[in-house]
Amino acid sequence: MSEQKKTGLESDEWDALKAYTDARIALGKTGVSIPLRESLLFRLAHAHAKDAVYSRLNIARLEADLASTGLPMYSVHSQAENRDIYLQRPDLGRLLDELSTKRLQDINSAPADICLIVADGLSATAIHKNAGPVVTLLVEQVRKAGYSLAPIVLVEQGRVAITDAIGELLRPRLAIMLVGERPGLSSFDSMGAYITYAPQPGLTDERRNCLSNIREQGLTHIMAVNKLMYIIQSAFRLQLTGVALKDNGGLLE
Amino acid sequence: MGYSCTIGHFTYRFADLKTVLAKASPLRSGDGLAGLLAESYEERVAAQTALADVPLTQFLNEAIIPYETDDVTRLIIDTHDAAALAPISHFTVGELRDWLLSDNADTDTLRALSPGLTPEMVAAVSKLMRNQELILVAKKIQVVTRFRNTVGLPGHLSVRLQPNHPTDDAKGIAASIIDGLLYGSGDAMIGINPATDSPATTARLLHMLDEVRERFAIPTQNCVLSHITTTLELINHQVPVDLIFQSIAGTQQANASFGVTLPLLQEAYEAGLSLNRGTLGNNLMYFETGQGSALSSGGHHGVDQQTYEVRAYAVARHYNPFLVNSVVGFIGPEYLFDGKQIIRAGLEDHFCGKLMGLPMGMDVCYTNHAQADQDDMDTLLTLLGVAGVNFIMGVPGADDIMLHYQSTSFHDALYLRRVLGLRPAPEFEEWLLRQRIIDNQGNRLSGGLQKQLYAALLPP
């Protein structure tokens, strides 16, 4: 074949090093540029991440996924009206809108030990994939341990600290928020869990404990629930969450 | 003094200098989050017009953060070099802008002027400039630094090889280092963001990097980006520390939230100097900054995020850094919403850093929740190359698998060097040639150091 008919694609001799890392190494090149195949793989990963950021919480589906817990569910919305506002105004994502505040005020039940909150965060996709199994397993364990549960709160356009606004109205002793994490190229469906003792407005993030990367290829659902149970029990024993619990607990990563 | 501008029959009045600065800022989401934006397009131009008339000397009389309560303000005022400013001290901000673009402001003049400029003057003039003007003036400025090689010479572009790994796995990191070196990256430094800030991990990685560098006699410098207190502790334990890293910001309060004070930076700088590990020079601090850090870590006090950013450069220049890196798109869309805002901020940061006398490089980057993609990075990367940026990041395939954001790749660096005729740091280029990794046209060769490198780093 003449030179003109060749694409000029060159592979890298050190292809075998890919065994040691998921980093995009040994991509090869054409001229000094990345080969098309690799370029398209990158675009696909970015497309998955973008789609996850703009994915919307499917409340009906979530309610069906959580139905087996037998707990009542209330869906609420933050003050961030849509995704673009949510992305630019994290402060609004931490506050309940008027209708949601009223909805939670109208709940007439005694304060419970634990309130579970499920929020879209930066990836509703992560919630669709992981919230059902984690909540179901967790509710089972929590009940076994003898704790009472508040209604489950489902939040659209919610940030972690909306926990405090919900906590002020429902007054649980402890809140657990499951929230979609910021998608990376290698994981667009990763869920986080934030545990807050005595949630109320004005708390800062060092008062919470956090589990990250909850997904099938990361921290598995069963492992996540085991870690959550450890934190819950430590929190009730110490009557706090956050940096102090992490220091004393020792088992947290 | 009063700050006002009349347009038609309406007079815009601005309460103080920081308000004029904020309202004159090109639109960005972080100033919206802080509630500091101009309320209309017209008000923004009115503020820019008012700002143009402010004499430079006013910046020495009106502190935007009180001298009494903020040690960064004290550093700015107490180290100000009035003699350096003297030749242009009668200028207004607007006259400074015209003069910077003129042929009267050449490389040597700008170097001599730098210590006479406060960050607020520099931020102010940048707000009156278009993107091409930020590029043109930055291109005239040369800031050359030395440790084991020379970075920032005209016609050269260096790369920080960033071989991060989510579990700090030594072989995983080594694999990315080999990939980067063989693509001609790593002359600015080999710099790892550790996944955890444990002293043991940081020490292990520093020893590994030092062995690689020694074994192959690579004329570069290493850094593990742990907190400065960790680095200090490691220096005391004779761990091989080349560059000393720290994230810094433009106020005492924001620096406190990063766990740093000016005396701590001084202590670390002196500890680094005492090691005497640089062979060509003793620039050894490596600072990272980024617009939005003040608001995200404590409050804005009515000051816009870009002015704060330049105040961080006043902190940086006090310690003669080897490299300063604005991590421009990393902070997220609540501070810089989209590609347009990231590109503008990147050019501002590069211009302002250079005018302040800093060896500016940039992490041309974005997160997945920002409205940006690799096309925007190509644009900013190219513009910065034209502007004479000292260094950029080299991340395998532009995908950082530990920090979960997108930056620039080893291929991107080769692209920029090729289209603009730029070369690696001279000592590093000589090493690449000697090892037969590239030829003198910058083309990669086969059969040079490759096999030795991976045989040595990754024993079967």
Image (cartoon, coloured by chain):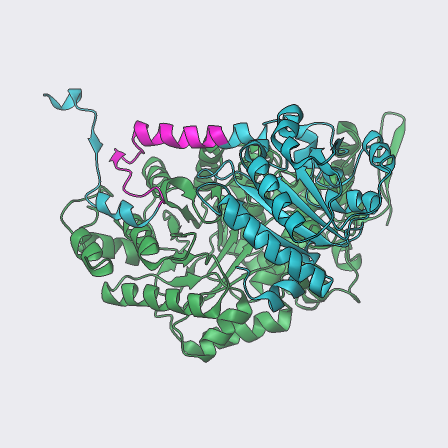
Chain colours: A cyan, B green
Asked if residue B81 can be seen in this view, the reply is no
Q: Is residue B289 left or right of residue A102?
A: left
- Percent x, y of residue A187: 47, 39
Visible residue check, residue B205 = yes
Q: Which residues are magenta?
A: A22-48
Q: Quadrant of residue A235?
A: bottom right
Location of the C terminus of chain B by quadrant is bottom left
How far across and down, in percent of the image, does residue B178 sit?
28, 52
* A63 in relation to B146, above or below: above
Count the labels in the image: 0
Residue A135 in percent (x, y) is at 61, 40
Q: Nearer the viewer, residue B376 or A212?
A: A212
Q: Is residue A22 left or right of residue B48?
A: left
Image: A43 above or below B455 = above
Q: Nearer the viewer, residue B123 or B316?
A: B316
Q: Is residue B419 magenta?
A: no
- Above or below, B371 relative to B85: above
> Hey, which quadrant is residue B77 in on the image?
bottom right
Q: Tell me residue A132's x, y (percent).
A: 58, 35
Q: Is residue B168 left or right of residue B263?
A: left
Q: Residue at x 67, y 64 (%)?
A: B256
Residue at 31% in and 28% down? A37
Nearest the camera: B184 or A14?
A14
Asked if residue B63 lies left or right of residue A184, the reply is: right
The extreme left residue here reads A1
* Residue A36 part of the magenta segment: yes
